Amino acid sequence: MDGDQSTRCIRRGFLRGAGVAAAAAAGVSGTGSVAGESEGVSVTIDDQESDGESVVVTSLQTDRDANLRIVSDQKNEEGFNIGYADIELSAGETFSNRTVQLNEQPIRETRVIRAEIYTDGPALARDSATVAVDEPLPENFGVQLVEADPEAGFNYPYFLFRPVGTREGDVPILVEPNNTGTATNDFSRHRTEAKDLAERGIARRISGELDIPLLVPVFPRPRGDPVDGTHYTHQLDQDTLELSGTDLERIDLQLLRMVEHAKSEVLGDSAYSFDDKLVLNGFSASGNFSDRFTVLHADRVQSVTAGGLNGMALLPIEEAKGETLDYHVGIADVPEITGSEVDLDALDEVDQLLYMGSEDENDTIGFGDAWTSDELEQVALDVYGQDMIYERFPFCQEAYRQAGVEAQFRIYEGVGHNPRPAADDIVEFHRRSLDGEDVSEFGQDIVQNVQFEIVPSEPLAGQQVSFDAEGSQAAANREIFAYLWTFGDDETAVGIDPTHTFESAGEYDVTLEIVTAGGVTGSTSQTVSVGSNPDTPTEAQSRTPTESPTPTESPTPTESPTPTESPTPTESPTPTESPTPTESPTSTESPTPTESPTPTESPTPTESSTAARTSTEGPGFGVVSGLAGVGGAAAGYRLLQSTQGDESDSEDG
């Protein structure tokens, strides 16, 4: 392997260490610790039988004073986890296989519980297990390894978990693709990570609460045998889907064969009755796998929850922004790769929840293990955009709408690369899908929508016009910090609902630009047709004094002449003479130092009104438009505000 490739593989492992693996007990793997906390705090608990009065904690350690609590993994009708026990722990305490008495209330029926270590805030570590109360765990309960069976069509093993309960009716099998987080030729590491995923985490909770079996495949992500680490098998990327002649050929089809094998050979004598559908869950790389698998095999998927997607869901369209969208950006070349068209009608029938955390910074752009084709990576940037949350993810929703495919998009505020805050929604989403209920309330409208209303819609010259941008929405529901307006007549304004007067009839292109955090902008324009106002003075009716003084303005013999009316010394009028307009003396003929300014020094009516409006609406918007780079529009907004002396709260960098 060359140095660049090795660096990419190591970096991918680092990202997972900072995100997915660090979220171990937050639902990604089974180390018993929560993302971002000390390795000196951990807890594990295994599936067990109990009389309901106590449980056995498999292992625990803490490097600080804390508490251990035992709670139900599922919330009750009031929205709370049921508390069974809470005991104090001392810094440095460690034990294994300890029986913990349930000092708050007994566990009255078989259910999934959680053991959590906490101080004052959220859990520092947690783990889940099924506790069978006053009954044995069912035969074959728990996780079992099923070896590879090439004759059955799959070249790698899988883990299968069967919960205590059995859901009535025809049910699907739940699948969570494995994600080791790094490329390695050590297959035992892939197997260990897959087992942990089957034993703990969100998929295990879905399985236990919905009473459907869970299957986790053990697909390798090798460094060099049979392919190198740039084949991101755990994402089901372009290079992986195009593989042929190796054991990794079409692992998407191998997964389907594993499912059929589990239903017929492993669970054939169980009480389950199966349909031909799958329920999928995944996060980060396995989220990408789940999302892409769903598009490729929509007719086999009942519901899917996929998060941590780098903002780039597989787009169910073939072109956008002048680019052809090949897999794994879009679906243009899918028939060439797989031999089958993408079934958009079937995809529209799948219940999909695609989600991101607003603080997620785990990006694959720029790292060759996810993008071995520079050309495809550039297409991704050109089409999706740079910002994962506020450009890419909203564009995905737009693309789905363009394709006529329903999907729920959601952004969890204040959340990083961690699926745990979405866990309750994920379980409930799949529950409602299996029950045939509506799931649309899980989604959000995250597409930017810049719009404004004009009243009256067809104004007259000189009439005040109101503009209202209250209906505008920034991408991903970000706060809008500024509303910047240009009215097509060299006038500008700021604010959500300004007013403006067009002095002359004509057509004016009015543009609204919104500015959100980080200088992210969006704009829209409307043409306003301004009609002539019969009540507005005509040009002939509103000439300046230098253009048409009337004879009545001529000085009389007894009147003192005004600066514009004084005759020259050689042209003094007689009492019987009255100068005609063409004979009126000009201001240059007789002003004195103490006399009023000449008409040429006074602004015309049009100049006066312009000066007044500019002083209230801010400087010319050309200043703002000229600001370049990220945050330019936001800087322009601050310039407008400072010029006006606005002291209201606004973005400050």
Image: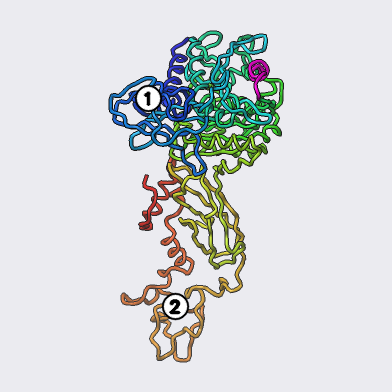
Q: Secondary structure at mark 2?
A: loop
Res 592 → quadrant? bottom left
569 is within the stretch colored magenta: no
Q: Residues within 10 Å of mark 1 (few under 14, many from 20)?
A: many
Q: CA distance from mark 1 to mark 2?
A: 100 Å
Q: Which mark is residue 585?
A: 2
The residue carrying mark 1 is 42
Of residues 20 and 370, which is closer to you in this image? 20
Q: Which residues are magenta?
A: 256-271
Residue 378 visible here: no
Quadrant location of residue 591?
bottom left
Q: Secondary structure at mark 1?
A: strand
Mostly what secondary structure, the magenta segment?
A: helix
Q: Work out whether 150 lies above or below 564.
A: above
> Between disc 1 and disc 2, whose residue precedes?
1
Up-down relation of residue 380 to residue 437 (above or below): above
Q: CB atoms at circles 1 and 2 under 8 Å apart?
A: no
Q: Around disc 2, counting alpha carbons within 10 Å, would you say few (fewer than 14), some (14 to 19), or many (20 or more)?
A: some
